[in-house]
Image (cartoon, rainbow, N blue to C red):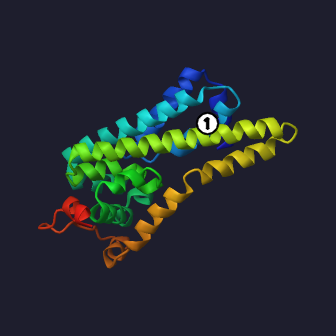
């Protein structure tokens, strides 16, 4: 992450904002990219005055919302075959076991999986395409997507920015300690949301996931609407 921050610091602010929006947007479409690392690094740059925090947060939120929406459209058009192809292309991140876990989150919690998914690496990548493939109503998806993107982007950026500014003021002579403090604060900025999301994931581990881990693809029961099931819960 320090290398990313150093690389971004050599770029004009406008380019940094575009990179933040672009990386997070592409990640939200279903391509495994280090979106959160780019956001954290840019927020730390904002604490040093290289870029403006409001523009970093706005770029991150824009990339998250638009990227998820594009991913939703792609998933709705491509359906499960698209998710299977993504799994073969990125087996470590989007393999059968990971897809089964994400799918169960949607089946059990509906659009809430979109909101909390913004704070979990796996669901952050799969939320848009999976919601489209499962035909989640777009208006409800967009509401959860926008809420999650805004909370994640602005919450992470401004907490890191505030802690970074304090660290710069009080720890000028030991800058490495300020950096460590800022990084720890960034990890803790979404702690309670991550814990809630991981509890959801761990509560949903079923034999279907174990079967998927051995190479079998999980499937949604044809006569059960996963979105309706999520709403009933």
Q: Would you name the residue on which mark 1 appears?
A: 43
Q: Farthest bottom residue?
A: 207
- Under circle 1, the secondary element is helix
Residue 15 screen position, x and y as percent: 54, 23
The residue under the point 31% across, 74% down is: 208
**Would residue 98 be visible to someone looking at this image?**
yes
Where is residue 167 shown, x and y percent of the image?
76, 41
Q: Residue at x 62, y 39 (%)?
A: 41
Q: Position of residue 146 (x, y in %)?
A: 37, 41
Q: Residues within 10 Å of mark 1 (few under 14, many from 20)?
A: many
Q: Write down the quadrant of residue 203 in the picture.
A: bottom left
Q: Say which residue appears at 47% left-offset and 63% top-offset.
A: 196
Q: Is residue 4 visible?
A: no
Image point 43% across, 50% down: which residue?
Answer: 118
Q: Residue furthest right?
A: 173
Quadrant where the C terminus is found in the figure: bottom left
Outermost residue to the left:
223
Q: What is the quadrant of the N terminus in the image?
A: top right
Q: Nearer the viewer, residue 176 or 55?
A: 55
Of residue 34 and residue 58, the one placed in the foreground of this image is 58
Residue 227 horizontal side relative to residue 38, left or right: left
Q: Vertically, is 186 above or below 191?
A: above
Q: Position of residue 39 (x, y in %)?
A: 55, 39
- Specify the quadrant of the image occupied by residue 68: top left
Along the horizontal axis of the image, is 187 left or right of 139?
Answer: right
User: As rendered, which of 62 and 93 lies closer to the eye?
Assistant: 62
């Amino acid at each position: 992450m320090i290398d990313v921050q150093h690389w971004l610091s050599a770029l004009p602010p406008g380019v940094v904002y575009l990179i933040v929006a672009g990386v997070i947007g592409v990640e939200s479409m279903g391509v495994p990219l280090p979106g959160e690392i780019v956001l954290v690094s840019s927020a730390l740059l904002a604490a040093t005055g290289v870029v403006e925090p409001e523009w970093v947060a706005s770029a991150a939120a824009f990339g998250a919302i638009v990227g998820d929406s594009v991913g939703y459209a792609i998933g709705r058009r491509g359906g499960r075959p698209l998710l299977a192809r993504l799994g073969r292309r990125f087996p470590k991140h989007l393999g059968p076991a990971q897809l089964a876990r994400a799918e169960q989150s949607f089946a059990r919690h509906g659009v809430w999986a979109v909101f909390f998914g913004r704070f979990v690496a796996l669901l952050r990548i799969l939320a848009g395409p999976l919601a489209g493939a499962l035909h989640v109503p777009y208006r409800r998806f967009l509401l959860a997507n926008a809420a999650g993107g805004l909370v994640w982007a602005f919450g992470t950026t401004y907490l890191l920015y505030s802690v970074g500014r304090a660290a710069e003021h009080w720890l000028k002579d030991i800058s490495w300690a300020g950096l460590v403090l800022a990084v720890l604060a960034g990890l803790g900025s979404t702690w309670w949301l991550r814990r809630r999301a991981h509890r959801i994931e761990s509560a949903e581990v079923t034999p279907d996931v174990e079967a998927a881990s051995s190479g079998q693809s999980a499937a949604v029961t044809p006569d059960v609407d996963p979105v309706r099931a999520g709403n009933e819960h």
